[in-house]
Amino acid sequence: ISDSELRDVVMNVILAGRDTTACALSWLFFELTRKKDVVEKIIEEVELVCGVGENADYSYDTMGKLKYCHCVALETLRLHPPVTNDPRYAVNRDTLPDGSKVPAG
């Protein structure tokens, strides 16, 4: 694999991750604007688990205990999968290293 091919693969991974994350967050905030009761439950859970004010703990471990928030994020991904909005296709036909044929288009 050439340096330019390697660069292209790495850039594709970086850009795909950024695009899908941005898409998922956009849908999450869109859905939250429509569901005030969900926002209230999220606030309640964050205050209960992380605390309030100067003593609040927003560490990685504490954030991992936010079960309702996690479910809200997963439901958003179920309703609006970001990958379907980012279609990829082969410009030219190709052959994978294992011999599998990939048609153009």
Image (cartoon, grey):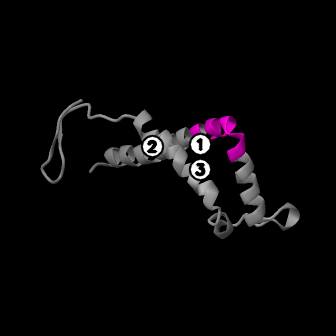
**Residue drawn at (53%, 47%) of the image:** 75
Query: Nearer the N terminus, badge 1 or badge 2?
Result: 2
Q: Which residues are magenta?
A: 27-38
Can residue 20 be seen here? The reply is yes
Crowding at mark 1 (Cα within 10 Å: few <14, some 14-19, many 20+): some
**Residue drawn at (76%, 67%) of the image:** 57
Asked if the residues shown at circle 3 and circle 1 are in contact, with their CB atoms under 8 angstroms apart, the answer is no
**Observer-nearest of 13 and 35:** 35
SS at circle 3? helix
Q: Is residue 57 magenta?
A: no
Residue 16: mark in rendering: 2
Front of the two marks 3 and 1: 3
Residue 51: mark in rendering: none
Residue assigned mark 1: 25
Per the model, the C-alpha gap separating discs 3 and 1 is: 11 Å
Crowding at mark 2 (Cα within 10 Å: few <14, some 14-19, many 20+): some
Residue 61 pos. (x, y %): 64, 70
SS at circle 1? helix
Per the model, the C-alpha gap separating discs 3 and 2 is: 22 Å
Query: Nearer the N terminus, badge 3 or badge 1?
Result: 1
Query: Nearer the N terminus, badge 3 or badge 2?
Result: 2
Quadrant of the frame with the C terminus: top left
- For this orientation, the residue located farthest to the right is 54
**Residue drawn at (18%, 48%) of the image:** 96
In this rendering, the answer to whether 99 lies above or below 30 is below
Residue 98 pos. (x, y %): 15, 54
Residue 13 pos. (x, y %): 42, 47
Residue 72: mark in rendering: 3
**Looking at numbered disc 1 in the image, what kind of residue is underneath it?**
Leu
